[in-house]
Image (cartoon, rainbow, N blue to C red):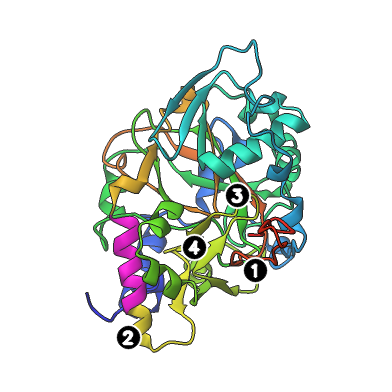
Amino acid sequence: MGNYWKVAGSEVNDQLYVNDLKEQYSSGKLADASEVETEISKVKYPEFLYRTKAEEAGLYNNHANPDHVKNDKGHLGDPTFKNLFKAGLKIEKFDLSPNLGTEIDGVQLSELDDAGKNDLALYLETRGLAVFRNQDFRDKGPAFAKNFGKYFGPLHIHPVAYSAKDHPELFVTFRKAGGPSRWDLQFKHQTDGVRWHSDVSFEEYPSSFSFFVALEAPPSGGDTVFVDLREAYNRLSPPLQKFFETLTAVHSNEYQQKGAALRSQLAKVKETSYSEHPLVRTHPVTGQKSLFFSRGFIQKIKGVKESESAFILNFLEDHCLNNPEIQVRANHRGTDSRSVIAWDNRFLAHTAILDFLNHETTARHHYRVTVLGEKPYLEEKKVEDSDSDGEDKHPRAY
């Protein structure tokens, strides 16, 4: 294991790489942000494909969310999930693994009342990941999606991503329909397209929940893989757990911003974010600890030498991301599955899978509702004073 850590996206500091990229954009081999003008007439849901206009550049800021620790809707959820999985409904469930992720058919998210949404929050906070099939979200329109997400907390406005028209809170991912030529371009400079991350970990208040809505999807592939960072923490030896609990990581979207600028994608939120978060964090509802290893946005470990930071981060990359025992694959299953994938970013990291690019497929077009959570923190178990009979006067806090 070397003492070098490559920050994701930092290839934009390589002028030869940048020159080649610019040539591909100018020649039309690679699509820059102007692709929206030609592709919007081809997609099934054009209202969810919008490029930031000049007058919107730098217009927005993201919210602080200081009260989320106590206001998380999971605190109100019923542990039996009776309001999510209501009696009388024909519900099919399949666990993606014993510990993480479940496919669910028979629950219509758009019809959940507040009690059902509270249960949904708690379900995601314990199960981590849910893949809901046969949803009507994409037909409800952007305003509905925004209002659904706002129930759980303030919504994030992504600095440089596509969005929905008049709804900057909806983050849109898009790869156009096509065939093997996409593969040649994607892998010209790299052997994989894997970009592990926890959503917007570069923010002071990163995401709690994400709801990822399929508009169009390849019939096979283009899936999302998740890793359980609770289990990654639990598998460490106690001395290493304690050591990692002393560390802080610096997260930033610096290179994401620079890469978007090369694609001529304007920034809705202009300022680059730099945030410091504990490497081990506590969940505000379950009290569980997890690693907070967002590979795509971590630049370094604060307060240690460069070689030491690289040593720690390289170990975590190998430990967290190369172990299939703590990973699951959420299958999108094409456009007709009408899937909505929901997860808790506080203890999951994920990556899209680009295994479909050498096949002739429809577009991969999704939007994401991204809820801001608490500022990550680590809280130790507090030992309270005891009564003379040995009973604690107060419950132990986490």
Relative to 279, does residue 341 appear above or below in the rendering?
Answer: above
Measured Cα–Cα span from mark 2 to mark 3:
35 Å
Residue 277: x and y in percent read: 56, 71
- Would you call the spot at circle 2 few (<14 residues within 10 Å), some (14-19), or many (20 or more)? few
Q: Secondary structure at mark 1?
A: loop
Q: Can you tell which of label 3 and label 4 is closer to the viewer? A: 3
Q: Secondary structure at mark 4?
A: loop
State the extent of the magenta-drawn residues as a range: 311-322
| Nearer-N-terminus badge (3/4) | 3
Q: Can you tell which of label 2 and label 3 is closer to the viewer? A: 3
Q: Is residue 343 visible?
A: yes
Residue 257: x and y in percent read: 53, 69
| Nearer-N-terminus badge (3/1) | 1
Q: Which residue is identified by label 4?
A: 292
Q: Which mark is residue 276?
A: none
Q: Which residue is identified by label 2?
A: 307
Asked whether disc 4 touches disc 2, contact meaning CB atoms under 8 Å apart, the reply is: no
Amino acid type indicated by mark 2: Ser
Q: Is residue 366 visible?
A: no
Q: Which residue is identified by label 1?
A: 204
Amino acid type indicated by mark 1: Glu
| Nearer-N-terminus badge (1/2) | 1
| Nearer-N-terminus badge (4/1) | 1
Measured Cα–Cα span from mark 1 to mark 2:
26 Å
Asked whether disc 3 touches disc 1, contact meaning CB atoms under 8 Å apart, the reply is: no
Residue 356: x and y in percent read: 31, 39
Asked whether disc 3 touches disc 4, contact meaning CB atoms under 8 Å apart, the reply is: no
Q: Choose top left, top right, bottom left or bottom right for residue 117.
A: top right
Q: Nearer the viewer, residue 390 or 375?
A: 390
